[in-house]
Image (cartoon, rainbow, N blue to C red):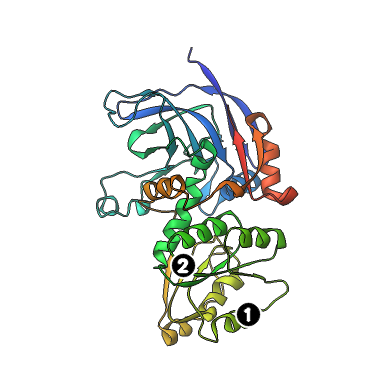
Amino acid sequence: MAEKIKAAVLHKPLDLRVEKVDMPVAGLDDVLVKVRVVGVCGSDVHYWQTGRIGPYVVEQPMILGHECAGEVVEVGNNVKRLQVGDRVALEPGIPCRKCFFCRSGRYNLCPDVHFMATPPVDGALVEYLVHPADFAFPLPENVSYEEGSLLEPLSVGIYAVRRANLGLGAHVLITGAGPIGLVTLLAARAAGTTKIYMTDVRDDRLDLAKQMGATEVINVAEEDVGKKVDKLTNGVGVDAVIECSGAPAASSGSLLWVRRGGTVVLVGMGPDEFNFPVLTIGAKELDVRGVFRYVNTYPAAVELVANGAVNLKPLVTHHYPLDQVVEAMDVAHKGTGGAIKVAVTLC
């Protein structure tokens, strides 16, 4: 009988159990990783709460979690780049590597991508997992497992900044100061953006945004974003808006807050349809861009954290062992105690 290990398995909405599963076996091109830390993502919470995200439905038991880092304990015979004992962060989306999108360098758009904790693919809240070696990235000694787990959300921020064409001297408005908004703030700072304005409805998150380098923060429950942006930019508007909240008002408002010829990047997962002033796009000659996860970001994410250009440590506010994963999900869902990022430590 195969050795059994512990995992956080979602059976149906609000039915998340820590139970025993079979130890996985590494293939020729894989590594077996002892998982050390997994960050709780909003998607994990959403699956736990509702059992689905859009067309992705939990129809059979599924292990949650995709923001992860751990230690290599076994390598496949074909693996040359990694060895036992290496500390690694795992990029959770594995594409086919053969289709048009993969071969053109945009593997995040691969229609056959297998992404951790997206039904029916199991995730990382498990003591050991098998992963393709080419999507495992070594961590320098000065980067902790916890920081390694946060390279996944940081990758979203890096990719959003790239899609926004931000660079030296740019001015940006980031809507939503949750984990993704905050890592986007960090990525924008690292890219040389000089004015970074952030919005949210929670003062504790806006305070953290200020501590992490936001130039100005706007509580949308108390201030009119358009008027504040006009004042801050002398009526010109920002070079780019990166929408990370998923709020329809922020998505449609972004077209009004960005300058003529600017760029709007939609990151937040909001409703599929909302009021979108299309004529404004033409009149202002705007570029409106979507973001689907990220592509070719992990090497940059590792370097930014290793050389101190990005400090992820303030993001993790709560820690739980695997046996308390339900409490971790609940705290992440409710934002209890000012929770920003909740981390589950497996060993």
Q: Position of residue 40 (x, y in %)?
A: 59, 43
- At x 48%, y 12%, the residue is 1
Instruction: Report the number of numbered marks.
Output: 2
CA gap, disc 1 and disc 2 = 19 Å
Q: Residues within 10 Å of mark 2 (few under 14, many from 20)?
A: some
Visible residue check, residue 64: no
Taking 253 as reference, is 105 left or right? Answer: left
Q: Which mark is residue 90?
A: none
Three-letter amino acid code at the position of disc 1: Lys
Most distant residue in the top direction: 1
Question: Residue under circle 2?
Answer: 193
Q: Nearer the viewer, residue 222 or 287?
A: 222
- At x 45%, y 72%, the residue is 170
**Tag 1, which secondary structure?**
helix
Q: Position of residue 23 (x, y in %)?
A: 48, 21
Which one is earlier in the sequence, the residue at label 1 or at label 2? 2
**Tag 2, which secondary structure?**
loop
Taking 332 as reference, is 99 left or right? Answer: left
Q: Which of the 4 image quarters holds residue 201?
A: bottom right
Q: Nearer the viewer, residue 63 or 106?
A: 106
Taking 177 as reference, is 84 left or right? Answer: left
If the image is split into quadrants, where does the C terminus sit? top right
- At x 53%, y 31%, the residue is 36
- At x 58%, y 54%, the residue is 179
Q: Residues within 10 Å of mark 1 (few under 14, many from 20)?
A: some
Three-letter amino acid code at the position of disc 2: Thr
Q: Which of the 4 image quarters holds residue 217?
A: bottom right
Vertical order, 237 against 248 (above or below)? below
Visible residue check, residue 192: yes
Question: Residue under circle 1?
Answer: 228
Vertical order, 113 against 215 (above or below)? above
Q: Position of residue 196 (x, y in %)?
A: 54, 68
